[in-house]
Amino acid sequence: IGHDLRSSPASLFETLTHPKHGYDRSMPTLFVLECVMMYLPNEASSDLLRHLAESSLPCSKSSYDPFVAVVIYDPIPSNDRFGQLMIENLQRAGITSRKGQRSVDDDDATSQLSLEKTRTLSDQLTKLAQSGFD
């Protein structure tokens, strides 16, 4: 299924819940996001996480509780030399703008990449909690 994760997560779930794809919101679900969130604008990654957290439906047909869990496997660049080099490489590739510069596509500060906003494990955990995961 092709989907631009910068767009509305609601449209992704409309596609996933289509009968031909078989996603059942009443079933326990694990979403694995490997090197995905880091490339999304921070606001888009937060929207996706909020939608994932809210995506399960209560199910009265069985004895299990539906739940959604996420595994996020993204680098945490910290503020060390490795993290700085990672950001510099993304800047050279044109994926993120240089500090103090804005790319043509940027309309405001919300275009900052998730990787730039969640630089520590604490940042990641706070973002998950604010999105509805406990």
Image (cartoon, rainbow, N blue to C red):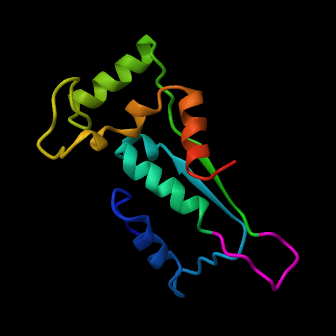
Q: Position of residue 29 (x, y in %)?
A: 67, 65
Task: Name the main secondary structure of what is drawn in magenta.
Answer: loop
Residue 64 drawn in magenta: yes
Q: Nearer the viewer, residue 89 or 56?
A: 56
Q: Is residue 131 above or below residue 96?
A: below
Q: How many numbered marks are there?
A: 0
Q: Residue at x 43, y 49 (%)?
A: 45
Residue 103 drawn in magenta: no
Q: Position of residue 47 (x, y in %)?
A: 45, 55
Quarter of the picture holding the N terminus: bottom left
Q: Which residues are magenta?
A: 56-65
Q: Residue at x 47, y 27 (%)?
A: 119
Q: Which residue reaches farthest right? A: 63
Q: Nearer the viewer, residue 128 or 13?
A: 128
Q: Residue at x 73, y 76 (%)?
A: 58
Task: Left or right? Give the position of 76 relative to 55.
Answer: left
Q: Which residue reaches farthest front? A: 130
Task: Left or right? Give the position of 59 relative to 107.
Answer: right
Q: Residue at x 21, y 26 (%)?
A: 98
Q: Is residue 7 above or below residue 108?
A: below
